[in-house]
Image: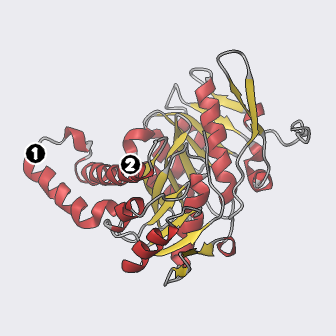
Amino acid sequence: LGDTEAIKPGRYLVSDIELLQSGKHPGKTNLTDADNALGILRYFSDQPAVIIVKHNNPCGAAVSDSLEDAYHKAYMADRVAAFGGCIAVNRSIDKQTAESIAKQYAEVVVAPDFEEGALDILSERKNLRVIRINNIHKLNTFIGQRVVEFKNLIDGGIVAQWSFAPQALTSSDFTIATCNYKDKEYVINRAPTEQEFADIRFGWLLESGITSNSVIYVKNGVSVGIGTGEQDRVGVAEIARDKAYRKLADRYCFEAFGIPYHDLTDRDKKAEIDDRVAKKKGGLIGATMVSDAFFPFRDGIDVGIREGISAVVQPGGSLNDYQSIEACNEANVTMVLTGQRSFKH
């Protein structure tokens, strides 16, 4: 811990915000939500990205060719949880994106800057905290940097530890899953495609900002189902799967009728949506499954395989890694290992 450094001049982020609008002053959770969002955003400086955080965990995340599209995808990934959340972006907010944000209820919007007219649109939301942090443009310089985390004990003691920093940052940092069990070598049959590698990287770096135990599903640069803070791995895989189904049903309902799925009373229309979601398997067909620690048995991976995932990324290191490799090969699913857990508590 003796190697820690104070914040250097010109390197401030959430520690020194510029509050452009505030019906209410940002609270502790608002600021830690913003900080956690920036901790994820630092890995996606090469393209427009949006992270929506609620209670220190992302509920929607997306990268895209435009900020407006990234926001729309992140928001629709979990409209319900995004209500009252913190929206963090890595590009200047334009009028189109501001109009999309202003249609919803959010607590906080964090951006490096705002284009002409964008603030006028956001000001329509009187209690919205609008925060400018110019150094968001420098977020990539924070990659690999760790800070000291503190946990206070009930007797007044303090536990200090270094924060997590993912080492797998590019496709070459991930290794094809392989292991030896009882003198037999087990190897994944299929290497990831270019798109699968893109989702593997996106999912693994998104995972770095999620409370453990966690399993998430991502597809085409968008979060599909996020499971957080559970005690068993197969259970959190199922929770993330179930959320993917529910969130897709809500999205279909909102797009078709402008109301939440929960408020839809027409049984026939509800059955039609349920059928569409079932055919799409909650949007999980072709998705990448991400786990912040190894799968103790194959049952966790089987949860995703039954829904049609095409790729898995996990640390590896279980005595039963061979089971996970067998499960993937049976379904022609690729799997890569990071060799590093992504625990966050």
- Circle 2 packing at 10 Å, graded few (<14), some (14-19), many (20+), is some
The label nearer to you, 2 versus 1, is 2
Residue 266: assigned label: 1
The amino acid type, in three-letter code, at marker 2 is Gly
**How far is the residue under mark 2 from the one under mark 1?**
32 Å
The residue located at (44%, 40%) in the rendering is 82
Residue 189: percent from left, percent from top: 49, 84
Image position of 16 with respect to 337: above or below: above
Image position of 8 with respect to 273: above or below: above
Picture quarter with the N terminus = top right
Image position of 331 with respect to 168: above or below: below
The residue located at (88%, 39%) in the rendering is 4
The residue located at (23%, 66%) in the rendering is 279
Question: In the rendered structure, are the residues bearing label 2 and label 1 in contact, judged by CB atoms less than 8 Å apart?
Answer: no
The amino acid type, in three-letter code, at marker 1 is Asp
Asked if residue 72 can be seen in this view, the reply is yes
Quadrant of the rendered structure where residue 24 is? top right
Please tell me which residue lies in front, 83 or 169: 169
Q: Which residue is mark 2?
A: 235
